[in-house]
Image (cartoon, rainbow, N blue to C red):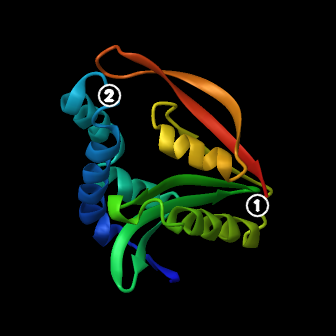
Amino acid sequence: MMLTYVALSPVDAASVSSRIHEWWVEMYGKEIRTGIEGLDSIFAREETPDHIVSHMGSGTVYKDVLLNGSVIGLIAYKVDGDTLYIDKLYLDGSARHSGHGTECLEYMLSEGRQAGCMRARLHVSPGNGGAYKFYLRNGFVLDYVEPITDCFGVTGERHHLVKLL
C-alpha cells in the first residue's frame, strides 16, 4: 500500500503540536530521566504551535502521512543549500515495523535529491534505540556527538547523523 503525503500549513500547527506531544510521551516518556515534567518542559521549548509556525516560516515542510486516507504519521524536512535536514519522522505505534518508516524516509530523501541536495542530516537521541538503528540500517552514519543539558541540569547527548545522497 502506497502512502500519501499531505502538506500542512500554519493553520494546522495546534493539531500538529498535539499529535507530536502524544508521540513524544509514547517514545520518550521513559527515556527522559525527569519524567513527563521534563518532557513537557523540553516540548514547550521545541514543539509548541508557535515553534511549528516559525519552522514553517523558515522553510521546514510539514506533511501528514496517510495510509488509505487515515493519518498514520508526520514528516518534516527542510532543504538548505545542498543539504536536506530531516526534522521529524513520526509514525503511530500501529504503523511501525511495517516498512512505512522506510517509505517515509525515502520520500524525504527523494525530495532532497530533486532539490539538488548532496547529503541528508538529522539528529537522534542515542536513547531512542529503535530510531537510531533504523537510520543506521538506512545508510546514515554518525557525524558528530553534541552534549546537551535539559532545563533540569540533566546532561545527555544528541547524535548527528549524515547520509550522502
Residue depicted at 25% across the width and 65% down the height: 15
User: Mark 1 and 2 residues: CB-CB less than 8 Å, in contact?
Assistant: no
- Quadrant of residue 29 in the image? top left
Circle 1 Cα neighbour tier, 10 Å, few/some/many (<14 / 14–19 / ≥20): many
Percent x, y for residue 25? Answer: 26, 44
Spatial CA distance of label 1 from label 2 is 34 Å
- Asked whether residue 81 is in view, the answer is yes
Percent x, y for residue 65? Answer: 43, 72
Which of 119/26 is in front? 26
- Asked whether residue 121 is in view, the answer is no
Q: Residue furthest front?
A: 97
Question: Looking at the picture, does residue 57 appear above or below residue 119?
Answer: below
Amino acid carrying label 1: it is: Cys
- For the C terminus, the quadrant is bottom right
Report helix, strand or loop for mark 1.
loop
Which of 146/78 is in front? 146
Residue depicted at 46% across the width and 20% down the height: 156
Report helix, strand or loop for mark 2.
loop
Amino acid carrying label 2: it is: Ile
Question: Looking at the picture, does residue 36 appear above or below residue 100?
Answer: above
In the picture provided, is 80 more to the left or to the right than 4?
right
In the picture provided, is 102 more to the left or to the right than 49?
right
Residue depicted at 40% across the width and 73% down the height: 8
Quickly name the residue at label 2.
Answer: 32
Residue depicted at 49% across the width and 44% down the height: 130
Q: Which mark is residue 147?
A: none
Quickly name the residue at label 1.
Answer: 117
Q: Residue furthest left?
A: 37
Q: Earlier in the sequence, mark 1 or mark 2?
A: 2
